[in-house]
Image (cartoon, rainbow, N blue to C red):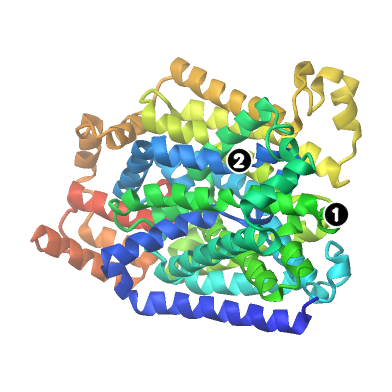
Amino acid sequence: MISAWLLVLISITYISILFVIAWAGDKHPGLYRRRLARTHIYALSLAVYFTSWTFYGAVGRATQEGLGFLPIYLGPLLVFVFGAPLLRRIIYISKRNNSTSIADFVASRYGKSQLLAAMIATFALIGSVPYIALQLKAIAMGFNVLSETGTGYEELSTAAWNDSAWYITLALAVFTVLFGTRHLESTEHHRGMIQAVAFESLIKLVAFVAVGLFVGFGLYGGFGDLFDRAKEADLIGTLTTDGIEAPAFITQTLIAMLAIICLPRQFHVMVVENTDHRDFEIARWAMPIYLIVASAFVLPIAAAGLLSPEASAGNPDILILQLPIMAGEEWLAILAFLGGGSAAAAMVIVCSVAIATMVSNEIIMPALLKFFRPRMNRRTDLSYLLLSIRRVAIFVVLLTAYGFYRMAGEDYSLTAFGLLSFAAAAQFGPALVGGIIWRRGNYMGAVWGLGLGFMMWCYTLLLPALATTGWVTDTLIEHGIWGLNWTRPTALFGSELDQTSHGIIWSLGINTIVYIVLSMLTRQRVREKIQIASFFHDPQPKAETAQHQSWQGEILTSDLQALTDRFMGEERSETIFRNYERRNAIRLYPHRPASAHLMKYIERQLASVIGASTAV
């Protein structure tokens, strides 16, 4: 075993390096002026998808299901190769609307609905907390496996201050607040944070490949020799197709395809943090290459684990750490620990920023402006309040995830709750994808589809998962509501499928059907038609022109400046108005009526701070 103090020193050094990279990225953004460097940083940041679940869990899953681990890699690969036009459109439309998050983007499509934005923010928070908790568990697990406390790596310490995950949570919260909330505008690029995430993407890929090559050429005489040994041990079936179930493979590939677009952190790095839409052309191919390289070593590591009785006897999720330790290669075990930590930390950092932005813009600020309007009106500058809300939200999200990790303890696996969070994010798919490709998709379909789909997710996936941890009684799972067998959450109407496929089919199926049927049966509102015109590049609708004309003469330029001062601060507000004058070669006079063009411009600037639905 490795000294716990040595691991602490290595961890502190690594975190310090991340701080330096992030600080340098914010203070000296020279790299972003070079398109080649900026493009590769952006492409690497997309690998935030590669979390501890993929780093540790894929190998563990491969030992049990063989190629059953592939859907999580296959889904995004298919989207990037065949769905690039859709991704380009999402990025382009998002930039036109100054979208701050997936909640803001979807709400903008359906008439800038505050209700829909708040629903997505709430559901994203609920779905992300278990996933963040997974990352905390993975880092703590890696630390405990490598340290001298490795004998009880799955046992939680009685006190938080003896728990490595507690200190990890605090360190990640501080890092995220420092580099994820430096700017008020959510669409302002967090260059330092993204550079740190890109660096972590390199580390986790190097670590995973290093362990894979070590297994092939360090433990065995090449991958051919490893294959022959696995064949002699009759493991080829176990490592390939014996454990694959077609419904599970198909449904998990589907939710992975939706997750690469709909996960809050993926939408943030791919869309919000995109500086130039042309950068996506490199990322479109870099991401599949990253996934292929990473997945290529999963089966060899799993095979080596199964061939080692000592390694296969324990938790398969830690094989990537155990194999180097048993071979006496401590340096490689430390590299693997840093790789797993990087995979987890990058996800936690970006997800926390994305969730905090949504909670702030779509839930807290609208509530404050609605229920405390007189008090808010007395404040001349709300910019500091906005930043404070986001910073507090980051700490609350991470501490809630830590609480979930403490309560669930060792009773849940990386794969189980990883799939649970993917299925939650996939519920945004019908409204998001439908809104991009189908003009008739409307607000009623989106709200009711999302609401009923998420209720089904809670009933068919979340409840059974909580029952396995002992938080919920098994009575409902085994006997259904009021003892009605056909209402069992794991077998609705007698459908016999694996638990994950069953929940995905029911939740996503009802979501999609309700979205389509209600969109066909109900009419779109005027505001929706205006937004659809924006999303589908139509000429400006007459309704919108008439609306702006009715405003002209009533709203003065000074009114707009006062509003911008409140939300963005006087200095930033002054810069925005001067930029408008310079770009349009005009002079603005405070006591003259504001033009429709100026109002639309200011609305877009405010949308970058408080979200489109609140800025209206």
Report how many numbered discs are placed on residues in the image.
2
Which residue is more in the foreground, 184 or 58? 58
- Which numbered marker is on residue 309? 1
Q: Which residue is mark 2?
A: 70
Q: Quadrant of residue 400?
A: bottom right
Question: In which quadrant of the rendered image does the N terminus lie?
Answer: bottom right
- Residue 365 sits above or below residue 502 on the image: below
Secondary structure beneath disc 1?
helix
Q: Position of residue 135 (x, y in %)?
A: 67, 59
Q: Position of residue 602 (x, y in %)?
A: 28, 55
Q: Residue at x 85, y 43 (%)?
A: 468
Q: Residue at x 53, y 38 (%)?
A: 75
Asked if the residue at tag 2 contacts the one at tag 1, i.e. Cβ–Cβ closer than 8 Å, the answer is no
Q: Residue at x 85, y 54 (%)?
A: 309
- Residue 470 sits above or below residue 310 on the image: above
Q: Is residue 532 left or right of residue 516?
A: left
Q: Quadrant of residue 396?
A: bottom right
